[in-house]
Image (cartoon, rainbow, N blue to C red):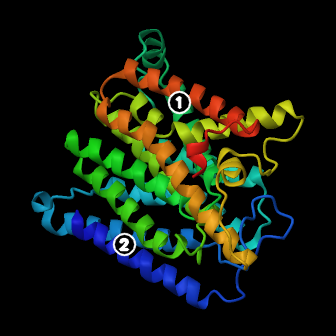
Amino acid sequence: MIWLSTIAFFFALISGGMIVRWSGDHHVVYGEDMPQRFHFGDVPRIGGLAVMVALLLSWSAGMISTAFFGDLSALRMKIWVGWFMLAIMPAVIGGLAEDLTQRLSVRYRLLLTGLTGVLGIWLLDLGVPRLDLPWIDGMLAWAPWIGMGIALLAIAGLPHAFNIIDGYNGLAGMVAVIICLALAHVALQVGDRALAALLLSTAAATGGFLVWNYPRGMLFAGDGGAYIWGVVIAFSSILLVQRHAQVSPWFPMLLLIYPVWETVFSIYRKLMRGDSPGMADALHFHQLVYRRIVWGVFHDDESRQMLMRNNRTSPYLWAFTLLTVLPAVLFWRNTWVLMAFCALFMISYVCAYLAIVRFKVPGWLQK
């Protein structure tokens, strides 16, 4: 498992370096008027390609190892891993196409992530079998297609949730690493070494990308990177709950509550203003942290000042993520405790958002 993660890390590192070195003018840049632009200069946005190359190579190596050594292989990465790789490709290709052209509308990208969900349900038999709520679990047992619909919604939506929080150097990438490590920890607890290997290699490949992304911002993940993290984590979360009855379905929900609730709250916020939910703006939680909390960076070079503020924003959100990941890892069997923490996070998020908007942020947070 360690050697598989090492392969993923180094191939992502090398691929990312090649993209930084040779991308040149072969990438599409954000316009100066784009609300999601918080950097100067033209930075390649195809870091997701480096992560994808690393994952395909490392997972293929794991499958070959299992094929050659059979039961002697500790990875046990059988044919289903190949279906896993095939199923995630439509979403990843859609994200990379947007990164290269900026002409693929949200509608088409949503359709491609939906196609990934359909392939996952067909090839991997994905579905949410239970929510550990008796009145709902009975309905899921009576009508399994409802669980498939929930799985499809999760798979189609989570990549876009990661795309929403992908605004600053190291933010979405580190959140993905933290969540993958938490999922891998529980997978190992229940003896699912193959799924743990997939998640650890995803974290390692993301680490190789982060060498170029944080703190210097030489390479961005783009939609392709966000979609890779979203679909891999969505597939893995559903498989973990589906295969192991002792894992509460609210464990992955609490792990992912930050990007999920950020998406839900953003949709609500935009609808209340009469805007389209697909319209980009600069009022997401991480963008308010950047503008209202991160300050006190002084440089004569405006580009350098923006980079430093960008880098100082991400740790606030990493800590925010850990507030949900730690209780999720501690109470991964206990549905009611996990549900309580989900509710606590949603309330805390809204309170924090309103406090930042109204300039009522405690002074110690701004130091």
Note whether residue 125 is visible: no
Which percent across, then down, holds residue 126? 44, 39
Q: Which residue is mark 1?
A: 345
Choose between 136 and 116: the one closer to the eye.
136
Residue shown at 87% from the left, 40% from the top: 275
Q: Is residue 269 left or right of residue 306?
A: right
Determine whether label 2 and label 1 are within 8 Å by CB.
no
Q: Which residue is mark 2?
A: 9
Residue shown at 82% from the left, 63% from the top: 34
Quote the CA–CA distance across marks 2 and 1: 32 Å
Which percent across, then down, holds residue 206? 44, 65
Residue shown at 23% from the left, 51% from the top: 193
Disc 2 element: helix
Residue farthest left in this picture: 72
| Amino acid bearing label 2 | Phe
| Quadrant in which the N terminus is drawn | bottom left
| Amino acid bearing label 1 | Phe
Q: Is residue 308 above or below residue 268?
A: below
Which percent across, then down, holds residue 354? 71, 32
Choose between 212 and 58: the one closer to the eye.
212
Which percent across, then down, holds residue 212? 51, 76
Instruction: Give the crowd class for mark 2: few <14, some 14-19, many >=20 residues within 10 Å.
Output: many
Q: Is residue 15 above or below residue 283?
A: below
Q: Quadrant of residue 36?
A: bottom right
First in sequence: mark 2 or mark 1? 2
Q: Is residue 246 above or below residue 200?
A: above
| Mark linked to residue 264 | none
Disc 1 element: helix
Q: Is residue 125 left or right of residue 360?
A: left
Instruction: Give the crowd class for mark 1: few <14, some 14-19, many >=20 residues within 10 Å.
Output: many
Q: Nearer the viewer, mark 2 or mark 1?
A: 1
